[in-house]
């Protein structure tokens, strides 16, 4: 699977360069969070054994994917006298614990006013962005207004906003038209060029507007001769521009924008300044200079102090700065951030420390944590008493916290997936994100509780009741709700979230939601949720049994032949070739191995040789089971055979290739009414090159591809569960695949409308709504993804075999001629 960045904002306060990563405002924090003080362990002593047993039955039935049994137990539990005692557990098992309200069906770039009364978000891009402002009170959410502009920032007193606005011009109209035409034509290079032109116009010509929040009164602030990149406020309400004088190269500076007159430059010297910017009190700011310096400056006197470091974070009361600094460069040849399995030193190549500096003006920085492991993303508690940060002790990022004096370090997370971007909601409550950029989930951690003691005293099943609580979901059994941005209110009682709550990542729209941490869902709402899920799951399974009934015996015989031992044997052989990137010798060896393995099954594979890059030859490997009745109709399944350059790609995507080999073996002598074609595609990691070449040839030959499955990264799991995600565009293919898993395998399936960054994108672009397939993302966050330690031993070969069973069953039903447009 193609790479996406690890980085994502907690506050959603970045646009092009993650500038101004924290609100420029000071506020006190009083958090009233429902439920965290009375978690499962605290409650469970009063729970009768009969109710505990009922919950155990519900939980473990859910755990093995027997959702009907689980929900039946959950319904009886909630209806039973005393069942209210386990309401939190049932709510978290089936969806959301806290009340959630939709703010808007589309939006991004969330920002709160300092008093938590107002929230802003944006819609649109490319010179057409609009900012929307809503008022959030105990009585509900009320729209205040919207206007043409972007990057809006609330003043410290919350009465005004500063934002950018690009006036209409012939150049803008032309660039917007070019971007729209390129997007419609699928010309990514032309689209990027048009968007770059729009960005240049924004930097050169954007007006800086100061607007009243409630009255809408506006005035334009002067910034003549400056390129404009970001905005913020000083503690006294003065507007600060991150900008650049023409011809300054990569240098940016901070400018104070007065009500009248020219902009006053605040910063000095070379370097890019202001990628992080914080207000401290009435007259000081903290900002980054490049990647290795942080400045604390008085905006009135100009007096400044710098410290060596990066990743600055400031407490909400303005008292404390935390940052990361390199104490000693141990080995510059070791790649920063590449941890090794079992490593306890030299993993990052640097000796690095978390530093804390009191912003009283006289203190010296103090070191609170030193390590050679990768470390990042410090956060400071509201009153400056605690610091949290990410460390990679082994393969994945974990969150640790320590007192500001360096004492009492504690490990907050122990999840095999990445735990990222800690943010304090109070002195003891931390918000964090888990997973990979395509789908992250948000959790709360109460570091004031002794989690280990609670588990030992009164164990209840389920990680979410052991020190972390899920913040957001979508109250469905199977559909994944990818989350992208999280912005806590200043008092920590609410969190605004940008998410695809319906699981639809194909739509350009992402909803904006408000999670109220002070209000838990009630029994009646959870009971209604359970009953709705139960009815939906019964209906899905009944439909599947009916669809598969005419061919059930044949499908069962085929899927019974899938052998995890054979899957492993192929994986072990392909592992010998190391990297299978198109630039590496292992790519040609993998093509040869796949072709010879398929010949041994009785196929005559087609090798689609082409030149993915100048001077490089590679090939797709394709085999066909010709249909007996309608051979012209082709049902596709594909997996990419290559890996990234740095590693063997045991999960990404040897797992998909070995599953497809096993599908090819069991279907070799089982022709169906329509044709089944299996393609091992090359060059996916170099830009979906093999998939696009395959589609180009198919379209040139006039082939009728009526369905297209693509399996990518299917072999890693975080636990004993054999689970993966159906990634689809077509509802019928989705439901067929769910039932193929239920009826003919032990696979547990989720789903998400998803095609991006995989070869499915090539088929989607060419053939539209015919996409299905399986992959770990966006529900699992494999910490070995695109790393050198994506090794054979991290793969569950039985999981790969279960995906092969599910894929074979899905193909056999699709090849009967199912109407997927139903």
Image: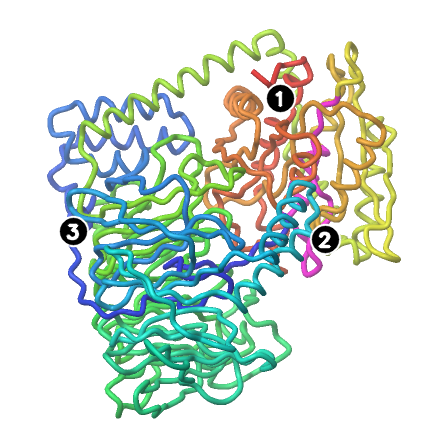
Q: Examine the image and state in which quarter residue 66 appears.
A: top left
Left or right of 682 on screen, residue 488 = left
Q: Nearer the viewer, residue 356 or 632?
A: 632
Q: How many marks?
A: 3
Q: Nearer the viewer, mark 1 or mark 2?
A: 2
How packed mark 3 is, by other alpha carbons closer than 10 Å (few <14, some 14-19, many 20 or more), is: few
With respect to residue 272, does 304 lie above or below?
below
CB within 8 Å, label 3 to label 2: no
Q: Residue at x 23, y 70 (%)?
A: 26
Which residue position holds label 3? 37
Q: Nearer the viewer, residue 696 or 265?
A: 265
Judging from the image, what secondary structure is the residue with disc 3 in?
helix
Q: Which label's residue is closer to the chain start, 3 or 1? A: 3
Q: Which label's residue is closer to the chain start, 1 or 2? A: 2
Which residue position holds label 1? 809
Judging from the image, what secondary structure is the residue with disc 1 in?
helix
Left or right of 458 on screen, residue 410 = right
Counting from the top left corner in percent of width and height, residue 526 is at 24, 30
Q: Examine the image and state in which quarter residue 814 appears.
A: top right
With respect to residue 337, does 754 lie above or below?
above
Q: Residue at x 46, y 17 (%)?
A: 541
Q: Is residue 743 visible?
A: yes
Mark-to-mark CA distance, 3 and 1: 47 Å
Specify the segment rendered in magenta. 634-661
Q: Is residue 635 magenta?
A: yes
Counting from the top left corner in percent of width and height, residue 468 is at 29, 51
With respect to residue 293, does 36 lie above or below?
above
Say which mark, if any, is on residue 686: 2
């Amino acid at each position: 699977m193609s790479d996406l960045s690890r980085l994502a904002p907690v506050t959603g306060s970045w646009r092009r360069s993650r500038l101004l990563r924290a609100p420029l405002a000071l506020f006190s924090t009083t958090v009233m969070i429902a439920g965290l003080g009375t978690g499962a362990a605290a409650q469970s002593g009063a729970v009768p054994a009969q109710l505990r047993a009922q919950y155990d039955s519900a939980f473990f039935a859910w755990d093995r994917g027997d959702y009907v049994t689980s929900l039946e137990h959950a319904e009886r539990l909630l209806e039973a006298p005393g069942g209210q005692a386990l309401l939190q557990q049932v709510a978290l098992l089936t969806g959301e614990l806290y009340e959630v309200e939709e703010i808007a069906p589309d939006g991004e770039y969330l920002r709160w006013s300092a008093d938590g009364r107002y929230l802003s978000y944006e819609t649109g891009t490319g010179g057409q962005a609009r900012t929307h402002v809503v008022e959030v009170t105990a009585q509900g959410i009320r729209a205040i207004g919207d206007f043409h502009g972007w990057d809006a920032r609330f003043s410290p007193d919350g009465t005004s906003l500063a934002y950018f606005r690009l006036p209409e011009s012939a150049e803008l109209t032309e660039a917007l038209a070019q971007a729209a035409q390129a997007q419609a034509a699928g010309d990514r290079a032309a689209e990027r060029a048009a968007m770059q032109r729009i960005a240049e116009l924004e930097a050169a010509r954007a007006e800086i507007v100061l607007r009243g929040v409630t009255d809408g009164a506006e005035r334009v602030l002067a910034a003549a001769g400056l390129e404009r990149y970001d905005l913020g406020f000083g503690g006294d309400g003065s507007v600060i521009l991150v900008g650049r004088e023409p011809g300054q190269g990569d240098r940016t500076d901070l400018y104070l924008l007065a009500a009248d007159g020219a902009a006053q430059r605040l910063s000095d010297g070379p370097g890019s300044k202001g990628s992080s910017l914080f207000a401290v009190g009435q007259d000081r700011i903290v900002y980054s200079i490049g990647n290795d310096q942080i400045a604390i400056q008085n905006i009135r006197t100009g007096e400044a102090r710098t410290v060596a470091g990066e990743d600055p974070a400031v407490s909400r009361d303005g008292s404390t700065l935390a940052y990361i600094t390199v104490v000693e460069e141990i080995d510059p040849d070791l790649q920063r951030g590449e941890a090794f399995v079992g490593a306890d030193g030299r993993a990052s190549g640097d000796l690095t420390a978390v530093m804390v500096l009191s912003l009283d003006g006289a203190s010296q920085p103090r070191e609170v944590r030193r390590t050679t492991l990768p470390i990042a993303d410090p956060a400071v508690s509201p009153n400056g008493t605690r610091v949290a940060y990410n460390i990679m002790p082994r393969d994945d990022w974990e969150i640790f916290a320590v007192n500001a004096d360096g004492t009492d370090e504690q490990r907050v997370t122990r999840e095999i997936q990445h735990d990222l971007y800690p943010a304090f909601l109070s002195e003891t409550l931390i918000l964090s994100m888990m997973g990979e950029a395509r789908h992250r989930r948000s959790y709360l951690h109460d570091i004031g509780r002794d989690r280990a003691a609670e588990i030992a005293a009164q164990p209840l099943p389920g990680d979410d009741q052991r020190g972390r609580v899920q913040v957001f979901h979508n109250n469905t059994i199977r559909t994944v709700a990818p989350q992208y941005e999280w912005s806590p209110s200043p008092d920590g009682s609410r969190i605004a979230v940008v998410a695809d709550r319906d699981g639809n990542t194909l739509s350009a729209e992402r909803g904006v939601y408000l999670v109220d941490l002070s209000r838990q869902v009630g029994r009646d709402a959870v009971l209604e949720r359970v009953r709705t899920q139960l009815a939906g799951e019964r209906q899905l399974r009944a439909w599947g049994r009916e669809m598969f009934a005419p061919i059930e015996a044949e499908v069962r015989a085929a899927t019974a032949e899938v052998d995890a031992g054979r899957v492993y044997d192929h994986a072990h052989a392909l592992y010998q070739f190391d990297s299978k990137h198109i630039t590496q010798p292992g790519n040609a060896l993998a093509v040869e191995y796949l072709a010879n393995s398929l010949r041994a099954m009785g196929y005559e594979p087609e090798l689609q040789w082409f030149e993915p890059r100048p001077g490089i030859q590679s090939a797709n490997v394709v085999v066909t089971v010709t249909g007996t009745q309608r051979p012209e109709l082709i049902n596709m399944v594909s997996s990419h055979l290559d890996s990234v350059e740095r590693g063997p790609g045991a999960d990404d995507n040897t797992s998909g290739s070995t599953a497809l080999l096993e599908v090819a073996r069991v279907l070799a002598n089982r022709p169906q009414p329509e044709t089944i074609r299996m393609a091992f595609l090359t060059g996916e990691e170099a830009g979906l090159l093999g998939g696009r070449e395959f589609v180009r040839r198919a379209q040139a030959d006039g082939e009728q591809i009526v369905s297209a499955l693509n399996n990518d990264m299917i072999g890693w799991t975080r636990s004993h569960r054999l689970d993966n995600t159906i990634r689809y565009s077509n509802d019928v293919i989705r439901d067929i695949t769910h039932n193929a898993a239920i009826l003919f395998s032990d696979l547990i399936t989720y789903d998400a409308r998803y095609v991006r960054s995989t070869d499915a994108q090539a088929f989607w672009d060419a053939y539209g709504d015919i996409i299905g397939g399986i992959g770990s993302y966006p529900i699992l966050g494999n910490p070995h993804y695109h790393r050198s330690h994506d090794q054979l031993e991290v793969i569950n070969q039985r999981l790969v075999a279960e995906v092969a069973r599910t894929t074979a069953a899905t193909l056999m039903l699709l090849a009967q001629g199912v109407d997927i447009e139903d």
